[in-house]
Amino acid sequence: LYFSAQDGILLFYHIKDLQYEVKLCADISQPISSLIFSPDYTFLLLITEQGPVYSYKPAHSGEAVKILDTCSTCFLAADFLIPGEKYCVSVTTAGEVQVWFLEDGTCLSKLDLGIEVHI
């Protein structure tokens, strides 16, 4: 079970029977609003309330890497485009839908909906 609170720390709870172990995975020092696994569970997207999106590879137990940063407005949601885990789609609070190449954070396409978006 992966979990994050308002402190920006990603935790992993390994639960077996009635016992559990907690492992600190990453500290990105800003509140995380969403955690989304890729379809094959090799990547975990960490979407923050302040704009940036980070990628974390659970199998490699490394640091979270910033892959996207909106600068002008905050991401509201993001998800992987399937099949595979090379691309993701995001929407900002300003109503901009974007398609990203995850290897280098390149924005491949964007569409402005012309309205603010809320959950």
Image (spheres, rainbow, N blue to C red):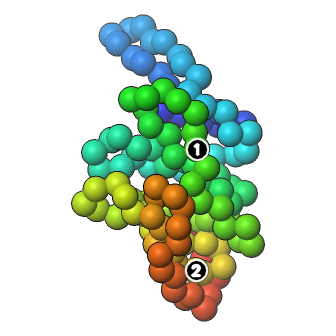
Residue at image position (66%, 79%) is 94
Residue at image position (51%, 46%) is 55
Identified by mark 1, the residue type is Val
The quadrant the N terminus occupies is top left
The residue wearing badge 1 is 65
- Per the model, the C-alpha gap separating discs 1 and 2 is 23 Å
Residue 34 picture location, percent across and down: 54, 50
Residue 98 picture location, percent across and down: 51, 75
Identified by mark 2, the residue type is Glu
Whether 23 is drawn above or below 48: the answer is: above
Give the number of the disc on residue 53.
none
The residue wearing badge 2 is 96
Residue 92 picture location, percent across and down: 61, 72
Question: Left or right: where does residue 55 sit relative to residue 58?
Answer: right
Residue 15 picture location, percent across and down: 39, 17
- Disc with the residue nearer the chain's start (1 vs 2): 1
Which of the pair 27/115 is nearer the observer? 27
